[in-house]
């Protein structure tokens, strides 16, 4: 009692009348409607308002803490169950140097699918021997550099096999190679455009062809069975087939396969457009995938001293949750049919995954008032620029910040300068310091490579 100030200041919250909201199609499902009011005033402890003030809007924000935590979770889930595990960071998922270096610092190798990604990994200090080179098109000069530097070449088709064999012949030494394999793992659509098919015998034929050529040695087998795979059993089937192929290759050629690579494809906690409820609820835990893959490997019958190293090239599962997009409300509108529309300053040019994901849209600050269904449009003068077709939002005013999440996977690498230039990107470090890791673009970034013919100059 003695501590009470003489004149206690009592602030009364403004009265808010109760509201009834009709459940509309697209909002309600068997889990009910989204009724809880949610906002996100801070990211990793840093106020959203402060981030906007310092770096502008829109703004991509990455959490170093989440990157490291997620990497360790995935690595641990597999390493608990299998003695030889190596993760290789999928560059195309997000090749910001700062992001890649966090993963390399955690021990990740690099997985690249083009010569430019290969060069990025080398610049990030990754030695060739820790680069997995995938993809259907590796130009011959790029193959030569990668082979020279000891990278792991994942052969996609017979033409590439021919080229790599030719290079081996010229170099006069036997080159280790990995074959990419595709197969029926029970999921649709089946990804059979990359690599050699297991089920029709093409893969084993390619292995025999490779062996009898005398210039290449089969080092590994690789499969990337799809992306955002919600069924761990598909991986169990894929792993069993790769292991069966590896053992058949050993019987045929006498050479034991050293690595089995299950690619990427683990889902993130994002919600897909077709899903009921939040995606985080329907996503199996990473342990289920680890169990499926390592269980199949351990049961395959490899002699103990020939247990292959398990390689994984997880992309979106490692980075998605670590990425946020802060955007600002530009305007509120009523469409002719009465629908509420909110226009924000980040569109599908920088949030490409809006086409597949139902991102969380969280106001930085909830000023109260009734939740109402709204369509969220980006700033582009283009009909397809819809970042959320339907979401419940409280009243928002022009200038209010909203946060989209998770956006760490594929948005930065697939962003484009369509109508607008690309925004700045910051990373929040473990001790909450905020660093600019990519400045916002200038007109010169867009126009720099262009050349104007003399006759069109003034
Ligand atoms: C894209 C890709 C990955 C990463 O895929 P995610 O679904 O993001 O995990 C891994 N390996 C290969 C060969 C890829 O093309």
Image (spheres, rainbow, N blue to C red):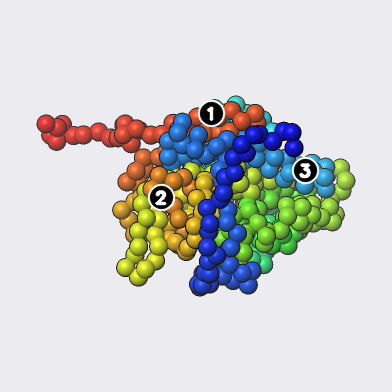
- What kind of element bears circle 2? loop
Question: What mark, if any, has residue 397 been given in the picture?
Answer: 2
The residue at label 3 has a CB less than 8 Å from ligand 1? no
Q: Nearer the viewer, mark 2 or mark 1?
A: 2
Q: Which residue in the protein does label 3 denote?
A: 76
Q: Quadrant of the C terminus?
A: top left
Residue 325 visible at all: yes
- The foreground one among 17 and 399 is 17
The answer to which quarter of the image holds residue 399 is top left
- What kind of element bears circle 3? helix
Q: Position of residue 121 (x, y in %)?
A: 56, 32
Q: Can you say whether 250 is above or below 443 in the image? A: below
Residue 294 horizontal side relative to residue 273, left or right: right
Task: Give me the C-alpha separation between circle 1 and circle 3.
Answer: 29 Å
Q: Position of residue 174 (x, y in %)?
A: 66, 36
Q: Residue at 39% across / 66% down in the picture?
A: 339
Task: Give me the C-alpha separation between circle 3 and circle 2.
Answer: 45 Å
Q: Which residue in the protein does label 1 denote?
A: 435
Q: Nearer the viewer, mark 1 or mark 3?
A: 1
Q: Residue at 61% across / 36% down in the picture?
A: 7
Task: Give me the C-alpha separation between circle 2 and circle 1.
Answer: 29 Å
- The first of marks 2 and 1 along the sequence is 2
- The foreground one among 252 and 120 is 120
Q: Residue at 55% across / 37% down in the picture?
A: 47
Crowding at dot 3, Cα within 10 Å, few <14 / some 14-19 / many 20+, comes out as some
Give the total of numbered labels.
3
Q: Residue at 83% across / 42% down in the picture?
A: 83
Q: Position of residue 197 (x, y in %)?
A: 62, 60
- The first of marks 1 and 3 along the sequence is 3
């Amino acid at each position: 009692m003695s501590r009470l100030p003489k004149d206690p200041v009592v602030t009364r919250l403004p009265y808010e009348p109760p509201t009834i909201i009709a459940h509309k199609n697209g909002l309600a499902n068997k889990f009910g409607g989204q009724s809880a009011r949610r906002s996100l005033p801070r990211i990793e402890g840093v106020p959203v308002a402060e981030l906007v003030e310092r770096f502008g809007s829109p703004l991509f924000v990455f959490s170093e803490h989440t990157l490291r935590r997620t990497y360790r979770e995935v690595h641990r889930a597999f390493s608990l169950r299998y003695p030889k595990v190596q993760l290789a960071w999928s560059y195309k998922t997000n090749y910001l140097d700062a992001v890649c270096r966090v993963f390399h610092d955690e021990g990740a190798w690099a997985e690249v699918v083009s010569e430019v990604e290969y060069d990025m990994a080398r610049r990030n200090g990754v030695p060739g021997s820790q680069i997995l080179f995938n993809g259907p098109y590796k130009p011959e000069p790029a193959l030569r550099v990668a082979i020279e530097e000891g990278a792991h070449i994942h052969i996609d088709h017979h033409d590439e096999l021919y080229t790599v064999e030719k290079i081996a012949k010229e170099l006069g030494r036997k080159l280790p190679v990995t074959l990419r394999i595709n197969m029926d793992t029970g999921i649709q659509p089946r990804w059979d455009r990359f690599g050699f098919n297991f089920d029709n015998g093409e893969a084993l034929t390619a292995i025999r062809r490779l062996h009898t050529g005398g210039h290449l040695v089969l080092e590994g087998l690789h499969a990337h069975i799809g992306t955002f795979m919600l069924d761990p059993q598909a991986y169990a089937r894929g792993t069993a087939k790769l292991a069966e192929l590896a053992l058949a290759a050993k019987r045929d050629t006498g050479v034991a396969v050293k690595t089995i690579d299950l690619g990427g494809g683990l889902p993130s906690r994002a919600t897909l457009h077709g899903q009921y409820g939040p995606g985080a609820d329907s996503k199996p835990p990473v342990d289920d995938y680890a169990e499926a893959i390592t269980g199949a490997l351990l049961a395959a019958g490899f002699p103990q001293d020939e247990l292959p190293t398990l390689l994984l090239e997880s992309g979106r599962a490692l980075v998605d949750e670590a990425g946020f997009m802060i955007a600002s409300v530009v305007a509120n509108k009523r469409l002719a049919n009465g629908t509420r529309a909110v226009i924000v300053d980040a569109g599908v040019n920088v949030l490409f995954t809006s086409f597949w994901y139902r991102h969380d849209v969280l106001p930085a600050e909830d000023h109260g008032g009734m939740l109402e269904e709204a369509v969220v449009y980006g700033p582009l003068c283009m009909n397809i620029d819809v970042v959320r077709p339907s979401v419940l939002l409280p009243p928002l005013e022009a200038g209010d910040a909203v946060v989209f999440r998770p956006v760490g996977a594929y948005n930065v690498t697939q962003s484009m300068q369509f109508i607008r230039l690309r925004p700045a990107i910051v990373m929040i470090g473990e001790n909450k310091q905020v660093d600019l890791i990519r400045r916002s673009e200038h007109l010169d970034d867009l126009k720099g490579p262009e050349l104007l013919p003399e006759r069109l100059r003034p």
